[in-house]
Image (tube, rainbow, N blue to C red):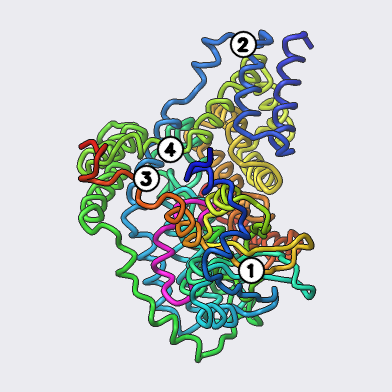
Amino acid sequence: METPEGITQATPVEEVARLVRGTEPILARAGDSLRDLAEAAIANPACRTIAIVDDELRLIGVVSVVELLNDIFVKVVPEEFLGEIADVPAALRYAEKIGARVAADVMAAPHAVHPQDAVRDAFRELHESGLDGLPLIDADRRVIGYLDQLELLVLWTGATGRAGLVEPGQEGWRE
Amino acid sequence: MTPVVAIGIAVFVVTYAVIASEKVDKTVAAVSGGLAMVLLGVIDQEEAFAHIDLNVIFLLAGMMILADIVRRTGIFGWMAVRSARLAAADPYRVLVVMTLATAILSAFLDNVTTVVLIGPVTLFLAAGLGMSPLPLIISQILASNIGGAATLIGDPPNILIGSAADLDFNAFLANMAPLMVILLALYLVAARWIFRSYLVVDKERVRALLALDERRMIEDPSLLRRSLVVLALTLAGFVLHGVLQLEAATVAMTGAFGLMLVTRQDPRQVLREVEWPTLFFFIGLFMLVAGIIEIGLIDAAAELVTAITGGALAGTAYLLLWVSAFASAVIDNIPYAATMTPLVAQLTAEHGPSGDVLWWALAIGADLGGNATIIGASANVVLAALSDREGHRITFGTYLRYGLTVTLATMVISTIYLWLRYLN
């Protein structure tokens, strides 16, 4: 029997794109400056993970908007970051941020999902990467879309209605 | 040579080689070597444990706890940013201020903690000024080792020497600090010429640095006030510990736990920050060295040194100074100092009170030798890695040009200092 949980877990990612109005991905090149990335993020605020691609639009890395903000503001208000440095790894991370000039300097590993991946796989990738969204890629690793974590919430609420969580005051709620 | 002596030498040499190769973590290597001395019957457990100098272990632990709590107040970052802002208009002034800040902090904190706190500020400054961080980073490497050499608590070899020779905080201040002040002053004068091609900045970029706000570095003003009071009392304790008939470890532990008491710190959190691997590294080294003491290797080495120098104090001091500097340039100066302290104890015994010069020769050589190469001390490695991550690689060869030159110059000046002050 298909349960709301089963639907939520097993639904392919491409189905999510059909259920919700999809968000356009942001594509950038490894040599783009941090300013270029910031301007691209501003132009498409619904997309919170920038896909870094090569000349054939194949995914080679990602930059989250949150990290981009940190990479830019480390040079604007360094005091906010310097106070947090307590050990060698933290100092090394700070040094990387100070030295960052282009997308290649700040991009993380190329986290992504395929259209046929189940939503549970997409969630695991989001959870493990700490990203707010993931590029959607085809079999050749070309970026074809973007999946945001909010879209997974839309799918879940659609599948469970209001039965997914027992809320205060509802039957079955225990103080 | 009896089998026990052969086994003891073999364990010692293999352990040293493994530590130097960095194939195995140095703490694991040192403790394994110490345990091998016991397991292979070179010494028994009682003898091995008796050689663990708890004054050294607890002094180190106390200073680690103190440094960790005070670091959380943000005062060190405040100092760094304040210094940077004051000097932001001129690259040479930035170099002088950051080098002095590094040397002063290194005199009271361990060198790695110092460079972790100062290094990132330096990189920000260099990026902000649009200049290469190379002159600042190299100056800070040199300053961390020179500053650390100035006090009993500034560098681990000094702690080992102070405990073994019963030389207190004031003895180090009186004998080591003057030389280090001279060396640092001369270096800063020379640095203007050495790095003249690097000390050029875009004046327009300076404005961004002037916008820095050091007040935002202070996380907890209340913790800061209480910490500074306890820190001041602890430093006073170090100055007076001879008069008070207290060992340095007692002063450090009283400061550490006194600070935990008045700042209501969670001991589990604070003790987690203690560098246990470093403490066990020392424990392993003490056990290892216990083995070679028991088999008579130290006696034999002392006889060899006496034969080379003819027993002359001056010759022995200069030999110790230069050999220690070269040894510390290529191997970790902590195991070197741990091995040399029993040897120097024997040599000083032959010369009475005037023999103390041998301790200073060992301390100067072991502390400053680390400046010669990029791998000569942990602080060097950390600063070079920071520069590398920031995009400015300092290669072994690049550093060697500056490090070796400065080390040779400091050794020559140190030789003159020893001659003028003790051997003339």
Q: Is residue A87 magenta?
A: yes
Front label number (4 vs 1): 1
Front label number (1 vs 3): 1
Where in the figure is residue A76, as x and y percent of width and height?
44, 77
- Residue beneath disc 2: B43
Image quadrant in which the C terminus of chain A is located = top left
Give me the chain letter of mark 4.
Answer: B
Where in the figure is residue B186, as x and y percent of width and height?
55, 68
The answer to whether tags 4 and 3 share a subunit is yes
Whether the residues at callouts 4 and 3 have beta carbons within 8 Å, the answer is no
Q: Secondary structure at mark 1?
A: strand
Whether the residues at callouts 1 and 3 have beta carbons within 8 Å, the answer is no
Residue B138 visible to the viewer:
no
Residue A145 numbered tag: 1
The answer to whether tags 4 and 1 share a subunit is no
Whether the residues at callouts 3 and 2 have beta carbons within 8 Å, the answer is no
- Residue beneath disc 4: B274
- Residue beneath disc 3: B170
